[in-house]
Image: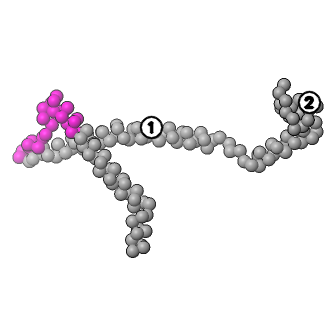
């Protein structure tokens, strides 16, 4: 039972189940939208149901209706899902590249800067914001 439980709780299986459920729900949305487009086509060009169409006695109407439905479904998915997803992904990738391009400040860099500031104070060179002759730890504005 432990192996079966581990199989069911494995991350990719749960992700796949979620994807199937969301895909099924999304298919209903796309089917309804495609039906609306088919109705619009029917308003302008007649009924978009070609099931009774035949050529030389061969019934090709069902195929034509299915093909038209497929093309419309692909168009809906492309224009309402693929293009927005591609644009959002490109923006996120650009933001990630900008964040990665910024140099990371390490603790060694900070310690080196502190060391250099302490050397300047020991020699008597004032640091920015320190008035010459003032106490090294005292910072006064000019």
Over which residues does the magenta segment extend? 34-57
Quarter of the image with the N terminus is: bottom left
**Residue 26 placement (x, y as % from top left):** 31, 46
- In the rendered image, the residue lying farthest to the left is 57
Is residue 82 found left or right of 119 in the rendered image? left
Q: Nearer the viewer, residue 11 or 84?
A: 11
Question: What residue do we see at 12% from left, 32% from top?
Answer: 46
The kind of secondary structure element at disc 1 is helix
Is residue 55 visible in the rendered image? The answer is no
**Residue 113 placement (x, y as % from top left):** 80, 42
Q: How many marks?
A: 2
User: Toward which corner of the image does residue 131 lie, by quadrant?
Assistant: top right
**Residue 133 placement (x, y as % from top left):** 94, 31
Question: What residue do we see at 42% from left, 60% from top?
Answer: 12
- In the rendered image, the residue lying farthest to the bottom is 1
**Residue 24 placement (x, y as % from top left):** 29, 50
Is residue 32 visible in the rendered image? The answer is yes
Is residue 41 found left or right of 117 in the rendered image? left
Residue at label 2?
A: 132
| Within-10-Å neighbours for mark 1: few <14, some 14–19, many 20+ | few
Task: Say the numbered circle drawn on residue 87.
Answer: 1
Sequence-first disc among 1 and 2: 1
């Amino acid at each position: 039972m432990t192996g079966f439980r581990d199989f069911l709780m494995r991350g990719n299986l749960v992700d796949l189940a979620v994807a199937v459920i969301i895909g099924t729900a999304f298919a209903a949305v796309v089917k309804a939208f495609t039906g609306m487009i088919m109705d619009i086509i029917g308003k302008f060009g007649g009924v978009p149901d070609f099931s009774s169409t035949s050529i030389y006695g061969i019934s090709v109407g069902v195929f034509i209706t299915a093909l038209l439905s497929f093309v419309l479904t692909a168009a809906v998915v492309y224009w309402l899902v693929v293009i927005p997803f591609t644009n959002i992904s490109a923006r996120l990738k650009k933001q990630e590249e900008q964040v990665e391009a910024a140099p990371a400040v390490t603790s060694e860099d900070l310690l080196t800067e502190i060391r250099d500031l302490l050397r300047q104070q020991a020699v008597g060179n004032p640091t920015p914001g320190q008035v010459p002759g003032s106490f090294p730890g005292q910072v006064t504005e000019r």
